[in-house]
Amino acid sequence: MINRPRRNRLNPAIRGLIRETVVSPANLVWPAFVQEGNNLRTPIVSMPGISRLSIDQLVADCQRAFDLGIPAVALFPALDDSLKNSEGTESLNPNGLLQRAVKELKKTIPGMLVITDVALDPYSCDGHDGLVQDGKILNDETLPLLAEMAVAQAQAGADVVAPSDMMDGRVEAIRWALDDAGFPDVLICSYCAKYASAFYGPFRDALDSAPKEGDKKTYQMDPANAREAIREIMSDEEEGADWLLIKPGLPYLDIIRLTREHSALPIAAYHVSGEYAMLKAAAEKGWLDYESCLIESLISLRRAGADMIFTYGALDAASFMQK
Ligand code: PBG
């Protein structure tokens, strides 16, 4: 036999030299849930190991993440129902929960990037990402609200705004609004191909943000479609997106690869709540090794073409990589 592929797997030194893909803490973004209160950590049952954190606890955990080499946090606020309305106006409150969290983080850990989610759902009594009228999710009427929300987040100090709503034309609307408000350096990480996925279940538990009526299928993409993602990639790129995010992660590796082939922009993959919950649940039963499966998931996302990965396992993965 002339060709013996196993020669290249002979020992760790050879395997290390020829390894094609690496994942390091520098590639990770930690998504975190923030709530009102002091010294509060409220566990999320469907996401073992993850809690909704009051701002002081969030800052402490972010410091730990940053010290582990994780450069960025993505914030999701859990609001009291009394603050929600159909237009999500609380999102503009300069003293609102999210804004205070951003300010506190930028004050305490200035080097850590703060990424904020631009979508109506955590603020909306309807639980949808856009304005709802007679059961319809309005597109154009939602755009100015998203643009104002992004500006409010930039004013609080957000480094990157991440529209996750899948309304048409929102990247451009947000770009103009940010520039007009004097924030030309705030980046836009566009949830470019976001699928109408059942893997978001635990996230909606965490924020109590499930749609009150209907589903998100008129704006999030059909899991059956790949070509349609190319169209979303092209338009978000033309509208001024700085990063393209694909979501969920592992079930959509082909879409990440497709994005890599169609755009030169940096790509983010979102290893979502349901993917994290599956690993944790199987590990709790003793059926899978959590850390190895987590690292393998992250490597796979990188191999498919993702530059960065949003994952609830960011701190676990980074601690593991330090060993
Ligand atoms: C909503 C939003 C969702 C997630 C991030 N932003 C849920 C949804 O679209 O219903 C999901 C994240 C996850 O499941 O980890 N704008």
Image (cartoon, rainbow, N blue to C red):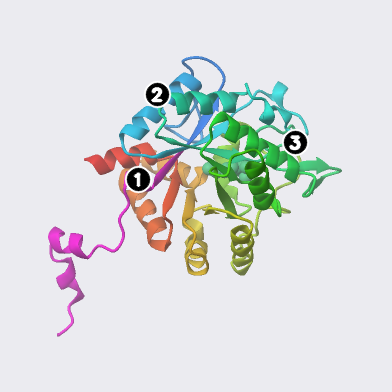
Q: Which residue is mark 3?
A: 126
User: Earlier along the polypeptide chain: callout 2 or callout 1?
Assistant: 1
Q: Magenta segment range? A: 1-30
Q: CA distance from mark 2 to mark 1?
A: 19 Å
Farthest residue, direction bottom: 1
- Residue type at tag 2: Ala
Q: Of helix, strand and loop, which one carries label 2?
A: helix
Q: Which residue is mark 1?
A: 26
Residue at 36 percent of width and 37 percent of height = 315
Q: Which residue is mark 2?
A: 60
Report whether the residue tagged 2 is closer than 8 Å to ligand 1.
no
Residue at 64 percent of width and 32 percent of height = 152
Quadrant (top left/top right/bottom left/bottom right) for the N terminus: bottom left
Residue at 74 percent of width and 42 percent of height = 144
- Residue type at tag 1: Ala
Q: Does 34 sit above or below residue 314? A: above
Q: Of helix, strand and loop, which one carries label 1?
A: helix
